[in-house]
Image: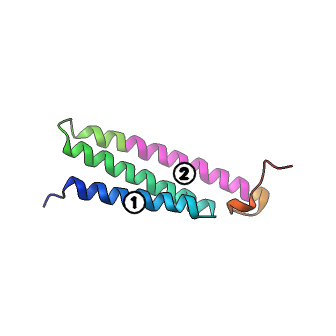
């Protein structure tokens, strides 16, 4: 059974909207990082769906998706390192309690 492109795009839109909502509403930095990962997964889903539906080589979208996954893994590692360093200094992971730029 072949899933239509519109259904995949709607699912990807819902996944991206869920991630965007999580980024805008969450107070916890780790929750924000997870929501960013959801948004990147929605972009990967779009890349693969469009590569399957176009006349280009089907590997094109998959190669771009692998690059996005590699960048997301790097961003997650750097983000978690920043969260750990912030926790060591401020003893909190809540965004509204962090004000490092203020004197």
State whether residue 44 is above or below residue 55: below
Q: Which residue is mark 1?
A: 15
Tell me if 63 is positioned left or right of 16 in this view.
left
Callout 2: SS: helix
Q: Position of residue 101 (x, y in %)?
A: 79, 47
As drawn, 24 above or below 61: below
Name the residue rendered at 61%, 54% in the picture: 80
Q: CA distance from mark 2 to mark 1?
A: 19 Å
Question: What secondary structure characterizes most of the magenta part?
Answer: helix
Is residue 78 highlighted in magenta?
yes
Marks 2/1 in contact by CB < 8 Å: the verdict is no
Query: x and y percent of residue 42 in the render?
Result: 38, 53
Quarter of the image containing the N terminus? bottom left
Residue 70: x and y, percent?
A: 45, 44
Q: Is residue 70 magenta?
A: yes
Horizontal arrangement in the rendering, residue 97 relative to residue 81 (left or right): right
* In front of the other: 83 or 39: 39
Report helix, strand or loop for mark 1.
Answer: helix
Mark 1 nearby-residue class (10 Å; few <14, some 14–19, many ≥20): many
**In the displayed structure, does residue 49 sit left or right of residue 32?**
left
Left or right of 91? Residue 35 is left
**Rendered image: mark on residue 78:** none
> In this view, which residue lies farthest toward the left?
1
Q: Which residue is mark 2?
A: 76
Stretch of the chain drawn in magenta = 66-87
Residue at the (28%, 37%) spot, across then down: 60
N-terminal-most mark, 2 or 1: 1
Q: Which residue does the image show at 37% across and 43% down from the upper left?
A: 66
- Please report the residue visible at 20 percent of the width from the left and 40 percent of the height from the top: 54
């Amino acid at each position: 059974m072949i899933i239509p492109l519109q259904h995949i795009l709607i699912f990807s839109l819902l996944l991206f909207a869920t991630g965007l909502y999580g980024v805008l509403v969450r107070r916890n930095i780790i929750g924000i990082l997870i929501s960013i990962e959801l948004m990147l997964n929605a972009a990967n889903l779009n890349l693969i769906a469009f590569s399957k539906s176009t006349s280009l080589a089907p590997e094109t979208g998959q190669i771009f998706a692998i690059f996005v996954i590699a960048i997301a893994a790097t961003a997650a590692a750097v983000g978690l390192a920043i969260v750990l360093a912030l926790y060591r200094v401020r003893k909190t992971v809540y965004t509204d309690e962090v004000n490092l730029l203020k004197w």
